[in-house]
Image: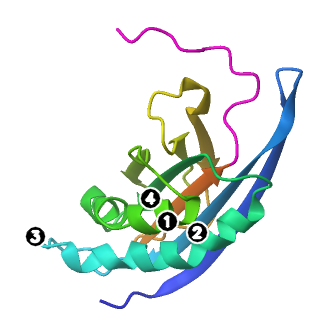
Amino acid sequence: MDVDIRKLIVTHETVLSEADQKAAPPINRAVGIAVVENPYAGRYVADLSPMFHISRDIAAELMPRLVALLDGPPVSYGKAAIVGAAGDVEHGGALIHPMLGKPMREAVGGGKSLIPSNCKVSAAGTPIDLPLGHKDDPWSFDHFDTVTIMVADAPRPTEILLAMAIADGGRVDPRVGTAPIV
C-alpha cells in the first residue's frame, strides 16, 4: 500500500535547565513527524495490516536524521499518532504498533524496553503528549518524560499525524530515584 505523505517535520530542542537547575550536560530531544493520508478514513476495514509497513518506511527515513541531531547517544524513545476525525483510533494503532519499533530500535542501537506510545482521534492543531522512556530499562524513572507536539494544520479529517521522538538524556535533576514498586 502506497501512502501520500503531505509533510515531514523534524524538530530539535535542547533543554538547558529546569526548576532553576542546570542540565549537566544539556538534554537534546529530536522529534520526527509525518502527516500522511489515511487510506481507510470514513470507512470500516477489519484488516488493517496493509497499513503496517507505512510507519516502518517512514521511521527508516526519519530515525537516522533524528539520531544525528543529538549530542550524545540516544537513551530514550517514544511514539504517538493523532488520527483525523474521519478515521478511528485503530488506524493510528496500525501505524504505531506492529512495525514502527524495528527501525526505531535499529537507529538507537538497542531497545529492550517497550516503546511508550500514545494515540487519539482529534482535529487539526490538537496537541498530543508523546511519552518517552529509557530504551533498555523500563523501570528507569529518571527517563519517564514527555514531549508535547502539535502541527497547526494536521491532521486534517482524512489524515494521520505519526510522530516518533528520541532523547540523549532523561529529565533535568530527577529526584524520584528508584522508588519501591508497589
Q: SS class of the residue under badge 3? A: loop
Q: Position of residue 6 (x, y in %)?
A: 55, 83
Picture residue at 28% right of the left edge, 63% below the top: 98
Q: Earlier in the sequence, mark 1 or mark 4?
A: 4
Rendered image: mark on residue 82: 4
Q: Which residue is mark 2?
A: 63
Q: Position of residue 143 (x, y in %)?
A: 59, 33
Picture residue at 64% right of the left edge, 59% below the top: 31
Magenta stretch in the rendered image: 168-182
Q: Is residue 67 left or right of residue 105?
A: right
Q: Which residue is mark 1?
A: 106
Q: Earlier in the sequence, mark 2 or mark 3?
A: 3
Q: Are marks 1 and 2 in contact (CB under 8 Å)?
A: yes
Q: Earlier in the sequence, mark 4 or mark 3?
A: 3
* Quadrant assignment, res 61: bottom right
Picture residue at 44% right of the left edge, 80% below the top: 57
Q: Which residue is mark 3?
A: 46
Dominant secondary structure of the magenta stretch? loop
Q: Residues within 10 Å of mark 2 (few under 14, many from 20)?
A: many
